[in-house]
């Protein structure tokens, strides 16, 4: 008997890539590949890449450089580049690194098995009309941890002036609701208690053509009917698709967590317009206010870009003012990175030291808000979904409804259990609590 071939996948970028990597592992599992945690003993290596900022994209080539020795020692080793760099740079990747066997764009993963078998170098960066995972057999019945991602929508038609996603992931496409509900039920049967619905514009979800009138809110309400599913989250949303029914769902759907990731990027209307975001700072704040009147304990998280071309100090002050007004529970912030092919790449850049300075000031304010909201949990009783065993004997770690990590000393609690916990201390990046 031959031993199974080994597959090593290294994942960069967003949660959609994490989901895709899991599904590719399952797909290749059907071809006799078993996952390995190191490239050293792999028969196939896939780099699932991200193109969002220049640094992210360049990592691919340095990582590939490290595999030269492996390929020399094992000529049968297959090396593939998948994800958004594969889509954006295609054939160019093989020119720069001839040892690469496969280049597969994010919408063509269902073709991996046949591409793997093809002898020669292969590139597939089409945007097929059928969705990549919808004609795949159901996920294999292996037990799962308590939390899972589930992609419901892909691609983007918004074309923010700085962003590569519409080019790398293609136009906005929603998966059929029936497929998503099946996949969710299957995940729950395998032990999942919390599902995070994913999409580059997840709240633009509208179901597939010919399957009735779907929205993300309706999908969430249907998912909430799955008895053993305890929690539902979704990410990432765009302010312009934040509909009234989705806001209302935060008030009337108990399983929908009081936490929303709603990127705004900037607080200056002048910059928002140049970014082609399609809304003003006041409209964004109005959404947050309406959410909080529906669900007062709502925590908001965001994404920010500093140093977008032509951003002045006054524009930047508007961003700080918006942050002061919203009060974020967490946030991601980035220096603007010019991306080839995007409209903003043609414009004048803000000097690097100015970008660094603004990023530092922005992050100081966000960190302060994050800490304040975390400290405010002390003394409160919260619900925790336990995920895994902690570092100390007898300790378990889980997440609160607001996505805070919570450490609890407990015997008899298993991963997947949801319990009430009294928060007793706020530590640097987590909370400590005791079972109620
Ligand atoms: N669909 C999501 C975001 C996807 S990209 C949305 O609409 O908000 C994730 C984040 O990366 C973005 O929110 C933005 O903050 C950041 N980002 C995207 N392009 C960037 C660029 N060229 N430079 C710096 N940050 C960027
Ligand atoms: Fe990129 Fe804008 Fe689309 Fe988000 S909405 S993925 S930032 S183009
Ligand atoms: Fe990166 Fe592509 Fe996600 S560019 S952020 S991996 S959609």
Image: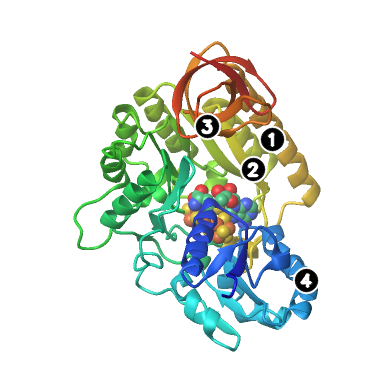
Q: Residue at x 66, y 47 (%)?
A: 334
- Residue marked by disc 3: 403
The residue lying furthest to the bottom in this view is 120
- Is label 2 in contact with label 1 (beta carbons under 8 Å)? yes
Residue 22 location in percent, x, y?
A: 51, 58
Of circles 3 and 2, the one toward us is 3
Residue 393 location in percent, x, y?
A: 66, 26
Residue 329 location in percent, x, y?
A: 56, 29
Q: Would you say the beta carbon of the disc 2 residue lies within 8 angstroms of ligand 1?
A: yes
Mark 4 burial class by Cα count in 10 Å: few <14, some 14-19, many 20+: few
The residue lying furthest to the front in this view is 1
| Image position of 272 with respect to 88: above or below | above
- Residue marked by disc 4: 65
Q: Tell me how far mark 3 sits from mark 4, CA to CA.
A: 37 Å
Q: Tell me how far mark 2 sits from mark 1, CA to CA.
A: 7 Å
Indicate which disc, 2 or 1, sits on the residue closer to the N terminus: 2
- Residue marked by disc 1: 363
Q: Residue at x 54, y 30 (%)?
A: 398
Q: Would you say the beta carbon of the disc 3 residue lies within 8 angstroms of ligand 1?
A: no
244 sits left or right of 372 in the view: left
Colour mapping used in the image: rainbow
- Residue marked by disc 2: 333
Residue 427 location in percent, x, y?
A: 68, 22
Q: Tell me how far mark 3 sits from mark 1, CA to CA.
A: 19 Å
Indicate which disc, 3 or 2, sits on the residue closer to the N terminus: 2
């Amino acid at each position: 008997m031959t031993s199974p071939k080994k597959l090593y996948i290294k994942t960069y970028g967003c949660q959609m890539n994490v989901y895709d990597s899991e599904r590719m592992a399952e797909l290749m599992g059907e071809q006799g590949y078993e996952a390995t945690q190191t490239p050293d003993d792999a028969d196939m290596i896939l780099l699932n890449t991200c193109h969002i900022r220049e640094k992210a994209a360049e990592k691919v080539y340095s990582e590939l450089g490290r595999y030269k020795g492996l390929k020399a020692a094992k000529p049968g080793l297959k090396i593939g580049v998948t994800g958004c760099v594969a889509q954006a740079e295609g054939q160019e990747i093989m020119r720069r690194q001839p040892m690469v066997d496969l280049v597969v764009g994010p919408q063509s993963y269902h073709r991996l098995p046949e591409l793997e078998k093809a002898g020669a170098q292969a590139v597939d960066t089409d945007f097929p009309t059928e969705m990549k995972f919808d004609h795949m057999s159901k996920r294999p019945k292996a037990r799962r941890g308590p939390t899972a991602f589930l992609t419901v929508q892909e691609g983007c038609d918004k074309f923010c002036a700085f962003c590569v996603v519409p080019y790398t992931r293609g136009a906005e496409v929603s998966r059929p609701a029936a497929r998503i509900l099946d996949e969710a039920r299957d995940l729950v049967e395998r032990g999942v208690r919390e599902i995070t619905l994913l999409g580059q514009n997840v709240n633009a979800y509208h179901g597939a053509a010919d399957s009735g009138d779907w929205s993300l809110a309706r999908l969430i309400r249907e998912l909430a009917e799955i008895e053993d599913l305890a929690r539902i989250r979704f990410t990432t949303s765009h302010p312009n698709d934040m509909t009234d029914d989705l806001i209302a769902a935060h008030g009337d759907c108990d399983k929908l967590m009081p936490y929303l990731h709603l990127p705004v990027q900037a607080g200056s209307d002048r910059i928002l317009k140049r970014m082609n975001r399609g809304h003003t700072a006041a409209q964004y704040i109005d959404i947050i206010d309406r959410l909080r009147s529906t669900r007062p304990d709502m925590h908001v998280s965001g994404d920010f870009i500093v140093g977008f071309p032509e951003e002045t100090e006054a524009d930047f002050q508007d961003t700080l003012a918006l942050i002061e007004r919203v009060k974020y529970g967490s946030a991601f912030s980035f220096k603007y990175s010019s991306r080839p092919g995007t409209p903003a790449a043609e414009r004048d850049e803000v000097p690097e030291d100015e970008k660094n300075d603004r990023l530092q000031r922005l992050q100081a304010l966000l960190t302060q808000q994050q800490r304040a909201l975390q400290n405010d949990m002390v003394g409160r009783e919260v619900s925790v979904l336990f995920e895994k065993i902690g570092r100390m004997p007898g300790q378990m770690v889980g997440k609160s409804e607001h996505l805070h990590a919570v450490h609890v000393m407990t015997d008899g609690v298993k991963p997947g259990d949801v319990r009430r916990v009294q928060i007793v201390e706020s530590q640097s990046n987590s909370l400590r609590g005791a079972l109620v």
